Every structure is written in structure tokens, then in C-alpha cells.
Image: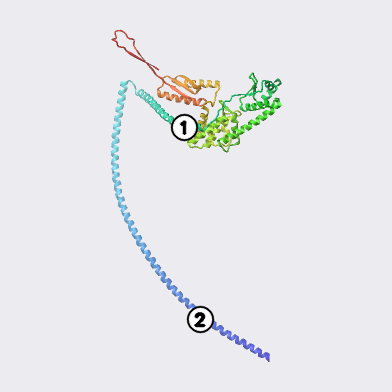
Amino acid sequence: MNTLIIAGFLILGIILGATIYHFLRNKKIKEAEQQANNMLGEAKRKLEKMERDAYLSAKEKLYQEKSHFIKQMKQKETEFNSMEDRLRQKEKELRKTGHKYQEKEWQIGKREQELIKWEHNIREKENEAERFREEQISNLEKLSGLNKEDAKKMLMDAMISQARAEAAQVVIDIKREAEERARWEAKEIMAFAIERMATEYTMESTLISVELPNDDWKGIIIGREGRNIKAFEAATGVKVIVDDTPETVVMSSFDPVKREIARIAMERLIKIKNINPKAIETEVEKATREVEASVKKAAEDTIQELKIKNVHPEMREYLGRLKYRTSYGQNILQHSREVAWLAGGMAAELGLDVNLAKRAGLFHDIGKAVSGDSEGSHVSIGVEVATRCAEHPVVINSILAHHEEAEPISPISVLVTAADRISGARPGARRESLEAYAERITKLEELANSFEGVGKTYALSAGREIRVMIMPEKLSDNETKLLASDIARKIKETMEYPGQIKVTVIRQTIANSFTDEFLPGQNGKKSETVVAEG
């Protein structure tokens, strides 16, 4: 029973709760619907307001754009009107210009007609002048007895002779002016370069002597049956001369390196007081190594002195060998150093590359270091060595240009050539053998005598000057000056000589006057005869 009551209450509570829940739920739904309806109405009102605002804004913007467009159209219309006015003005101006051109064209046509008439008249005048000229030529031929071609030839000969004389004078004047200016500037540059460079000269020959402690050493050097001297000559390649010169032995060789090795070896053998074939071989080997070290040191000292960088090892070796090479008695390494200093000094004065000038001057005779062991001139060998060692093109060109085997490609090549000649021409720099001197003198005189109009030729100042006496009746003063240049140019092209040769051409005219012998009956009057001799 109690259980039924409790169950009834539970059911009643559930029903009551469901009723209350349903009531509350319907109330909330109604409130939500009411709120939604309110929000929807508010949204509609806002939307209508936004539509009205947008419509009014668009309408206002459209009005503004329409006003702006109308304003632009009016402005464009004004511009178009202004442009149309300008075009009308231009059209008027063009019409005026066209009228002017038409008028000028008419005037030009009129002038052309007048020119045609004048041309016709000129042709008539030319024909008339030609007929008159032919008549005059015919009359002249009759009067002179010469035909047209002969007279023309005479006139041309006279004009050519006059032109040659005038040209010779012009050439002489230009040359004199250029020489004076160039000589002054060159003297300034070379004098400054020479002042900055100081060097010594060594005169070497094919002989070298070694002092002996006493004459007894001559027998020791020769040895039993000449054994020692033969061994020494075989090891060094040098001829040993033992003569009557007291306490001296002489060695001879054209190779200066071998002479130096022989000198050092001989002095050491005398110092150790032991001369035999084995000792000779040992000392010659030591002397050879010493000379090779001297060659290397000479190259290094020279390169450091001139401050030259990046020198190929092969070039260094050949440069050191020049220490024992000579030309006309002048040491080639010393000569190359001097040329480098001179070329560098002149390059500094001219604003050129000083280091490149020194380099070109130092290596200009590099071929002489190997010329005895290879075929070809020292120039071709030097070019081959420099090219193989990737030297600068100006250095290679300087090797060729200093003996005129190629045209200079740079002012530095010209400076090297000038420095080479300065070094070789300075007093005491070089010497020649008697045979070479006599041969050069003879060749100089023969070369000068080969020119037309030359009477006598004399070589003076040890072949450094040649004086040419010409026949005055064959050459004029201007032709005399040209002859001097021609002789100098031919000497330069056909001869090899140290230094510089001066060419002096002399033309002299002597006039003598004599009176006739006085005879009685001439009332004291004397007639005079003038005789001129060249």
C-alpha cells in the first residue's frame, strides 16, 4: 500500500514536472519568436535606411561625376578650339611659305636660264681663247724654231730643276729647325740621365796572366814531358803560354768564362803547391763552381740594383753570363746595366714607364750570353730567349729595334736604342782591333766616294768623322746639304760601327782675278780677265 502511494506520488510529480517544463518551454519559444520578430523588424528598418543612404550617396556621387565630366568636356572643347585656331594660323603661314617657295623657284628657274646663257657664252669664249692660244703657239714655234713638245720639255726641265732647288731648301730648313729643337731636348734628357748614372769600364783581351812565386814554377806547371800543362789545357780549354816573361804565366782563350776558370784554378794550384793531373782536375771543378756562383751573384746583384722584379730563372742565368762577355772590349753586363740606367733616366724625364725602360735596357743584349753556343745573331737569339721566358712585348721589340731589325712599337724602344749608342760611344767604352779599324776606315771612304760629285774623301778622328770634298760645279749648296744626309743614311744602312759617325761635306769656290799684260800705246788702260776655279 505504501509502495502504491509512493509510486502514485512519483507519477504525479513526473506529470506535474512535465506540465511545468512544457509551459516554460512554450513561454521561451514565444519570447524567442517575439525577440526574433523584433530583430527582424529592426534589421528591415536598418536595411531600408541603408538603401536610402546608398541611393542618396550614389545619386550625389553621380551628380559630382557628371559635373566633373561636363567641366572636362568644356575644357577639352576650349583646348580643341584653341588648337583649331593654331592649326588655322599654321595653315595660313604654310600657304604664305608655299607662295614664297613658288616665287623662289621661279627666280631659280630664271637664274638657271641666265646661267645656261652665261655657260654658252663662256664656252664660246673658251673656244675663242683656245683658237687664239693655238695661233700663239704656232707663232711661237715659228719664231723660236722649237715645236710644242720640245718647248714643253724645256719648260718642264726648268720647272723640275727649280722645284728641286726649292724643295731642297725647304727640306733643309725643316730639318735644321727639327734638329735644333730635337738636339736641345735630347741633350737635356741624355745629360740628366748620364749625370745620374756612374759606371766603370773594363778593357779585356783574350790574354790573362798569373804571377808565379819564382821562375822555378814554370817547370812545375809544364811537368814531366809536358804532362801537367797538357792536363790543364784539356781540363780548362785554355792555351797556357810559358815564355821568357819573368815570374809570369800567360793563358789565352777567346772564351772569357774559360779564362776566368783557368785563372782561379792556376792560382789555387800555386797556392797549394801541388800540381799534378788529379789536383788540376779537382781545382778546375772547384773553380767552375765558383764561377757559376759568381754568375748567379752578378745576376742577383744587378737585378736588385735596378729593382727589377719577376725575372725568369733562365733570364737570370743568361744575365749573369754577361759578366764574362765582352764586345769591342766592353763588358756586356756593365754595358747592359748602363743602358738600363740611361733608358730609365730618360724615361723618367719623358714621363714613361721607368721600370719597363730599365728592364728593356738590361735585357737588350741578352742574346750575347748564348750567341757563341747557338746559330744566329745575338738579336735573333735574344728574341727567342725573351719570347720563351714570356717577357714584355716592349722588351722583345727593344732587342730587335736597337739593331734596326724591327720598327719601334714604343718610345721605350727608341730610348733603349739611344742609350745603347750613348754607352758604346762614350770615351774608353770600347776598342777595336787594328784590322777592324783599318777596314772600317777604308769602307767609309769607299762608300762616300760612290756618290756622284764627290772629289776626295778623308776619314778623321779614328773613323768617327768623315770629310767629303765635292766638285762645286756639279752640286749646289742645297744639294751639298742633302748629300751629307744621304751619305749618313747609307753608312747607317750598310755598316756596323761603335758610337756615332759625323759626316762633313765641304763645297768651296775660289775666284782669282788677273789683269792683261801692259803694252805701250794703250794710253795706260788695262783690260781685266777674271778666271774662276772650283
- Where 432 falls versus 15 (above or below)? above
Q: CA separation, marks 1 and 2? A: 121 Å
- Where 69 falls versus 456 (above or below)? below
Q: Nearer the viewer, mark 1 or mark 2?
A: 1
Residue annotated with mark 1 = 188
Depth check, front residue: 2 or 114: 2
Q: Quadrant of residue 150?
A: top left
Depth check, front residue: 459 or 118: 459
Q: Residue at x 38, y 64 (%)?
A: 68
Q: Residue furthest bottom?
A: 1
Q: What residue type is disc 2 on?
A: Gln
- Please tell me whether mark 1 sits on a helix, a strand or a loop: helix
- Please, which colouring scheme is shown? rainbow
- Where 87 falls versus 453 (above or below)? below
Residue 334: % across, % down: 56, 30
- Please tell me whether mark 2 sits on a helix, a strand or a loop: helix
Neighbourhood count class around disc 2 (C-alpha, 10 Å): few under 14, some 14–19, many 20 upward:
few
Q: Residue 34 has which mark?
A: 2
Residue 393: % across, % down: 54, 36
Can I make out residue 44 in this image?
yes
User: Is tag 1's residue or tag 2's residue first in the polypeptide sequence?
Assistant: 2
Quadrant (top left/top right/bottom left/bottom right) for the C terminus:
top left
